Image (cartoon, helix red, strand yellow):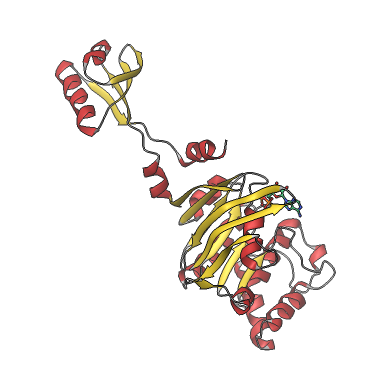
Amino acid sequence: MISVRNVHRYYGDKHVLKDVSFDVHPGMMTGFVGGNGAGKTTAMRIILGVLAAQSGQVLVDGAPITADQRAAIGYMPEERGLYPKMKVIDQLVYLARLHGLEAADARSHALDLLERLQLKGDPTDTLESLSLGNQQRVQIAAALVHRPAALILDEPFSGLDPESVDATVQVLREYAAAGAPVLFSSHQLDVVERLCDRLIIIREGEIRAMGTRAELLEAATTNEWEMETGSDTGWVRAAGVEVLEYDGGYARFRAADVAAANRVLADALGRGSVTVFRRVTRSLHEIYKEMTK
Ligand SMILES: Nc1ncnc2c1ncn2[C@@H]1O[C@H](COP(=O)(O)OP(=O)(O)OP(=O)(O)O)[C@@H](O)[C@H]1O
């Protein structure tokens, strides 16, 4: 497990990471979400060691991360970083060889990745001759080609069409399933919600929430209920709950607990038909908006 602990980072006097702590669990896809400038790239670069924190630590299984462990992380930087004029296959083989893969293994693994990531183009094409979406696939392949022990990907899905997102996710999931921790950043909450096992929400350098999707939804559960009945709901005011909205057969109220809400339901059923009775829940989108506003 990769752990970031109490990290602070300043640029001049701008405090861009404020006591940031989170874990990236092995075998899981962790989505790192937040708006522009929230601090995602800075935090990722600190894990990689390409940027230093002013204080705090990066740990692997509880011990300070080593240079070898950092070198074994597959990283897709935001600014990308492959050679535009070099053939796709040549640079992937080169990168894999730098990490110690044998030439034949490097080549077959690179070709296999390009196929699974559905590169539309020839592996002998230069990077710059490919469309942006295809260049993106090559960048993802570059992060994976040396069979990394962990993956950190900065906005890996930006610029990919839905089909390519699915193909990429499939490949990343296989890595995670084999036990690697996978951290990826995104602005696109819908993509993150669909893909990741855990989420970390960051705003202005502060971690606002983290956990599985179910944990975040549970933590944001309200004590509000909605009810629609066949007749006027004016009586709810006297039912021992706080009425928030009332309009004919519709009422929204806050109850202290489930039992109090159920007493309202029983009362309503005694008075006639109930067509809707539900706890008001928030979507991940609403939670995200609230955490990042
Ligand atoms: N080299 C730098 N010098 C000064 N300020 C910087 C530098 N790099 C980043 N920052 C500032 O640090 C803050 C965090 O930036 P960072 O790139 O980590 O955010 P992000 O969440 O990755 O954003 P985005 O999604 O836009 O890439 C921003 O306010 C940014 O302007």
Number of callouts: 0
Towards the viewer: 216 or 231: 216
Viewer-proximal residue, 20 or 121? 20
Q: In front: 55, or 5?
A: 55
| Residue drawn at x 64%, y 67% as measured from the top left | 48
Find residue 222 and report its image quarter.
top left
Q: Residue at x 56, y 54 (%)?
A: 20
In the rendering, at what x and y percent does residue 160 appear?
Answer: 65, 54
Question: Looking at the image, can residue 44 be seen?
Answer: yes
Q: Is residue 119 visible?
A: no
Name the image quarter holding the C terminus: top right
Give the vertical position of 270 relative to 36 (above or below).
above
Relative to 198, 227 lies left or right = left
Q: How far across and how far down the image is residue 162, in percent? A: 59, 52
Furthest residue to the left? Answer: 270
On screen, residue 102 above or below 247: below
Q: Position of residue 251 (x, y in %)?
A: 32, 18
Q: Is residue 48 left or right of residue 170?
A: right
Q: Is residue 222 above or below residue 59?
A: above
What residue is shown at x 30% (from left), y 20% (from top)? 242
Please name whichever residue, 288 or 69, is drawn nearer the observer in this view of the structure. Answer: 69
Q: Residue 196 location in percent, x, y?
A: 49, 56
